[in-house]
């Protein structure tokens, strides 16, 4: 479903509080704007044709125009964020003067994380632009081309983008990058895996979701994802293990069982092979994230 900006607007800024169990009922696409989501609280799993990734509190999720995506819960915490949506025209002055590299870097490999000090500053700027946007809206001020209010919003947004570009940690290893862009049937299969990874999934069950035979599904899945079904399911479970290690105090055994691994020892060996360290070492190394 296409989601354009409201008619006549080139920017919106919203504060959102959403229940922990909310999930998008279908794929959505920002047809005419960029989106920057500042995660204040909660954890969300984002699925796109190009990659899957998890957003934690303190992260920014960046979505470029025309990117189909779908989100599901990644924890039991409520979801609170500040969401900035803006058209390419709204930042045209910046991109014309500085070049396209700012936007290309920010919107290439989400999620974006920060050091503690930088995160505090950048999220403070997000709250500032939200307050400014609301003041302008409540006072009914003009934000058309050449207006003072538009200039103030553009300047503050430009500053935010430059700070994110300069201070953000753009680590593609935090995302599962797909071998090629996913077709809709394979996207549905990936979504089903993300929703049911904790269960003993079989390829026959997931192939039915896509509408393909098992043999054809197996070939297409491996071609688009760059790994076979069993390997992809294992990686998906390991990504959720990472998430629970960071967001809960549960034991490795509890996390292993909740993420669909029958034997904790198998999970630990797979985790070490994939990430180069044990789950406990990963938790210790990332306790401040």
Image: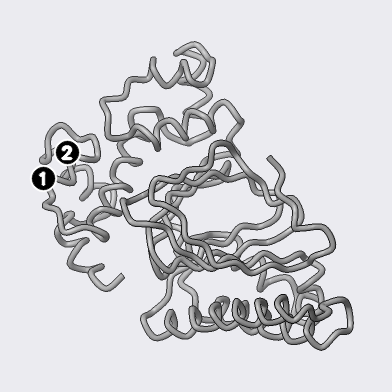
- Image location of residue 195, percent across then percent down: 39, 35
Q: Callout 1: few (<14), some (14-19), or many (20+) C-alpha neighbours within 10 Å?
A: some
Q: Position of residue 249 (x, y in %)?
A: 16, 59
Front in this rendered view, residue 209 or 134: 134
Marks 2/1: CA–CA distance? 6 Å
In this rendering, would 225 be left or right of 236? right
Residue 223 placement (x, y as % from top left): 52, 30
Question: Which residue shows up at 70% across the image and 49% down it?
Answer: 3
Query: Is 209 left or right of 93, judged from the image as shown?
Result: left
Q: Is residue 191 above or below residue 4?
A: above
Disc 1 designates what residue?
A: 253
Residue nearer the viewer, 277 or 201: 201
Q: Which residue is mark 2?
A: 257
In this rendering, position of residue 249 left or right of residue 148: left
- Whether label 2 touches label 1, CB < 8 Å: yes
- The chosen color scheme is one colour
Marker count (numbered) = 2
Image quadrant containing the C terminus: bottom left
Identify the element where label 2 is drawn.
Answer: helix
Q: Quadrant of residue 88?
A: bottom right
Q: Quadrant of the N terminus?
A: top right
**Residue at x 51%, y 15% (from the top left corner):** 216
Callout 2 environment at 10 Å: few (<14), some (14 to 19), or many (20+)?
some
């Amino acid at each position: 479903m296409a989601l354009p900006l409201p008619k006549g607007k080139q920017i919106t800024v919203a504060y959102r509080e959403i229940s922990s169990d909310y999930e998008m009922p279908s794929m959505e696409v920002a047809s005419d704007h960029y989106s920057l989501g500042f995660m204040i609280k909660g954890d969300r799993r984002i699925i796109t044709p190009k990659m899957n990734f998890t957003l934690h509190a303190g992260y920014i999720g960046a979505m470029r125009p025309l990117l189909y995506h779908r989100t599901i819960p990644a924890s039991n915490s409520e979801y609170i964020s500040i969401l900035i949506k803006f058209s390419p025209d709204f930042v045209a002055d910046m991109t014309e003067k500085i070049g396209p590299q700012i936007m290309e870097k920010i919107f290439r490999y989400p999620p974006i994380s920060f050091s503690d000090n930088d995160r505090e500053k950048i999220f403070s700027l997000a709250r500032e632009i939200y307050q400014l946007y609301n003041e302008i809206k409540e006072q009914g001020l003009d934000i058309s081309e050449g207006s003072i209010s538009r200039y103030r919003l553009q300047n503050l947004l430009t500053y935010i983008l430059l700070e994110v570009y300069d201070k953000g940690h753009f680590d593609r290893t935090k995302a599962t990058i797909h071998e090629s862009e996913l077709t809709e049937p394979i996207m549905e299969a990936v979504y089903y895996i993300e929703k049911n990874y904790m269960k003993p999934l079989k390829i026959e069950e997931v192939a039915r979701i896509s509408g393909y035979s098992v043999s054809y599904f197996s070939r297409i899945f491996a071609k688009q994802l760059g790994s076979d079904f069993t390997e992809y399911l294992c990686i998906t479970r390991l990504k959720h293990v990472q998430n629970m290690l960071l967001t809960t105090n549960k034991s490795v055994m509890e996390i292993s069982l909740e993420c669909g691994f029958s034997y904790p020892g198998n999970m630990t060996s797979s985790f070490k092979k994939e990430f180069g360290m044990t789950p406990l070492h990963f938790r210790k190394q990332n306790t401040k994230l």
